[in-house]
Every structure is written in structure tokens, then in C-alpha cells.
Image (cartoon, rainbow, N blue to C red):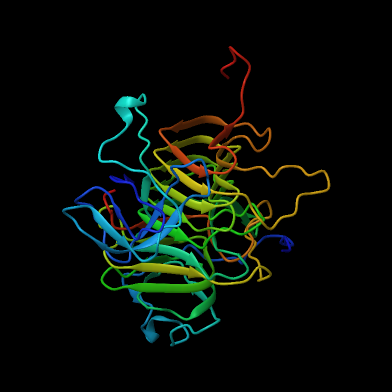
Amino acid sequence: MTGHRCVGQCGEKINENVAKEDRVRYWNVSDDWPAGKVPEEGEDVHIEPGWSMVFNLNPSPVYKLIRVNGNLTFENTTDTHLRCKHLFVRAGELNIGTAEYPMEKNARLTLYGERNAETIVYDNAIEAGNKLIANVNKVRMYGKSRGW
Amino acid sequence: MTRLTAPAPRGASELYVATGLDLGAGDRLGLLPTSYSPHAIDDVFVSSYDNETGRVTVNSSLSYYHWGQATSTGPDYNGLDMRGEVLLLTRNVKIDAEDVESWGGQIITGDTIEVFDGVTTSRAGSTVMDNVEIFNCSQIDSEHAALRFESAATAYSSITNSTLHNGYGWGLSVVSSANILVANNNLFKFRPMGLVLNGARNVTVEGNVVSGVVERETLEYDSDHIVDKGAGYSICALDTTPCSDIKVRNNIAAGVVYAGFVTIGHDCGVYD
């Protein structure tokens, strides 16, 4: 395993001063993506500031990096399975269920990669590594209580 | 967590637990040791459960004997119930990782500062998980736990009623972080550390079960044959980094090779 550091600031500049959209985007709808198509295997995915994106695939292709700078929520009416190598919650939020309404269906998030896979660096003081969900903002996950 | 209401012999494919549980085919169970061997754990999947009798059939024969009886031994042993613990490891929200080279996934929460064009943005990581299952996570021979809080010292986080199991390295670590509740979780099968606090502040660890924490088999001891550090709960014991406002209450360690709980001592009369 090799440690890495950023030269200067980690990551890229993002414009967070955008109004929240008054609509919901759905992952499986081509028109809800800037490229006009659903992201494919091995691609980077960007949930942009102001978006409310609902993830609803089962399973998804294996994405390389998912950057969450808007709101990413898992669909609560069907089983879902998100697959990726890295997921970085930076200026946005990742939500699966809520405290009031825990996830009723099955939601799964699987990470991919081997020991020497490319690493992610979001802060020079932290050895984050690879094959990870990195969160510097807000992650909320509520599953169904089993009662014991 | 529930307990065995009858002995479960080695080789058996059925066991008895409480009645009326939310338990069904496909659920994964961890059975904790009741013998002197910390390795005597079983990891099985439920085939069926009788809600009225508490009879559970499982998909494979038990590798070890686990003791149980209908009533608690608490009245006879100063409140200590010696019946074998049974953990439910399954949840409907799951985070897992492809099993490659014993190199699992990891979830890391932290704070960071970004500076672009002279403008500074502070970000404070906050993770709340309730009834979440995390498995095939943590990375072997590293300090990359399945669930890491590292320099997450500003916002509030909580991990409750969740299960972390079948990892390759550490289970859960809180390093240079603050304002975190870790309550009523099951940690099962990690090595050689279960739950680690270091340089932590305002952290409560309550009502958890940490089990099946065994020695690593891959990392060679160095030439001085220094014993690898291990613990079910390592509470501010890794080095001299100070902790403050740490509460550790009502937790269980079972099936841990080294020590259930490790923490620093202090001189008599010193409470700071």
C-alpha cells in the first residue's frame, strides 16, 4: 500500500452557491444526467450541488468514484444496490431511510478494489486509503429495527 | 442479542433461543464462546425458526459446544448470566466490500478545511447509522478499521443498533475525534482489535457486544518478537495521546484472544 499526498489543495473547486432544484432526479432516467445517459461501468459520477438525486438501480454498474455534492437518497420503495470503488460525500448528503421512516426495502452499498488500487486523498492530514466511503459532511442511514 | 435457552452441542444443526423473536430464514447469527477457548465461535445462517418454541435450525453443523439453559444464572453469580450469547448480524441496510486479498472496504468520517482562491471552507463530518450491517470491511495489517472516525472532532455522530462483522482488521476506531455515541452494536470477527478509542473526547460506548477478536496470522512478528497489541475494546490505550470525557458502560467482550478491555491506569487518588 502506498500513501499519497496532494500538492496544494486536495480536490477540485466546486460552486456551492446554487439554489436547490425544485425537482427530483432519478438515477435511472437518462435525461436527469448532464450527458443525457445513465452513468456506465467504470465512470466517475458527480451528484452536483443543488441536486436531489434518488438512487434506484439494482444493481448498478461498478463506478469508479461517486462524488456527492448534492443530496443523494436511496429509493425506499424497491430494493437497491449501489456498487463503486470510492464514494466521497463532500458538500452533499447521503441518505438511506430517515429516523421517522427507516428503510423498508433492502439497500446495499458494495465497495470494490484490491490492495494496490488507486487511493483517495481528501485531506493531507488523514491517510484515507482506498476502497472507501469518505464523509466530510453528512451521512444518514436508518435500517429497519429487528427488535433484539 | 439473545441467549441460548438450552445447550447447543458441537455438530448440532439446531439450537434454542427465546420465543417471539423477529428471526427468519437467511438471517445470520453469531454464537459466542462459553468455554475457555476464545476461538469457539460459530457463524451460521438460519434455515428456520419456530416462533412458539424458539427452535432454530441452521444451515451448517456447529463447530463448537455452546452452553445455555432456560433461566439466567444471574441470581447465582452476582448478576452474571453465563448462557451463551446469540447475535443477530443481519440488517436490511448493508455496506459490504468485494472480498479481495483480505482487503475490505472502509467508511471514514472526518473534518477538513478547503481553501480555493483565498476562500476557506470548513467541513465537519457527521455520520449517523442505525440498524446498519457492515461486513467484509476493514483492511488487513493496517489501522484502517471497517468504520473509522478520524479527526472528526466537530459535529455529532452516532452508531447504534448496527452490526459490524467478518472483517480483516480492526472493527471500529475513533481517533482524534469527538462527540460520538457507539451504542447497542454487535462487532463480530475482527483482528486484532475490536473497538479502538485514541485521542478521543466526549465519546460514549454503551451496550455493545464485541466478540471473535482474534490474533492476526499474516503479519510476522519483528526480530524482537514484540507481541502484537490486541483487545476487544482498546480504550485510549494505544499510546499516550490523551482522551477526555469517555464513558464505557454495560458492554460485553466474549471470545477475545488477548483482553476484553484494555485501558490506561492511573495513580491512586488521581482522577483527572
The image position of residue B263, as x and y in percent, is: 59, 31
Dividing the picture into quarters, in which one does residue B219 lie?
bottom right
Observer-nearest residue: A109 or B15? B15
Please count the marks in the image. Answer: 0
Task: Find the residue positioned furthest to the right.
Answer: B223
The image position of residue B10, as x and y in percent, is: 41, 54
Q: Is residue B156 visible?
A: no
Instruction: Examine the rendered structure and indicate whether residue B253 appears above or below residue A20.
Output: above
Observer-nearest residue: B222 or A64? B222
The image position of residue A104, as x and y in percent, is: 26, 64
Instruction: Examine the rendered structure and indicate whether residue B259 appears above or below residue A91.
Output: above
Q: Residue at x 20, y 50 (%)?
A: B19
Instruction: Examine the rendered structure and indicate whether residue B13 appears above or below residue A35.
Output: above
Dividing the picture into quarters, in which one does residue A29 lie?
bottom left
Q: Residue at x 47, y 86 (%)?
A: A35
Q: Residue at x 65, y 38 (%)?
A: B238
Is A107 placed left or right of B255 in the picture? left
Task: Find the residue positioned furthest to the top.
Answer: B269
Is A102 placed left or right of B255 in the picture? left
Q: Is residue A136 visible?
A: yes
Quarter placement of the C terminus of chain B: top right
The image position of residue A20, as x and y in percent, is: 38, 65
Observer-nearest residue: B141 or A88? B141
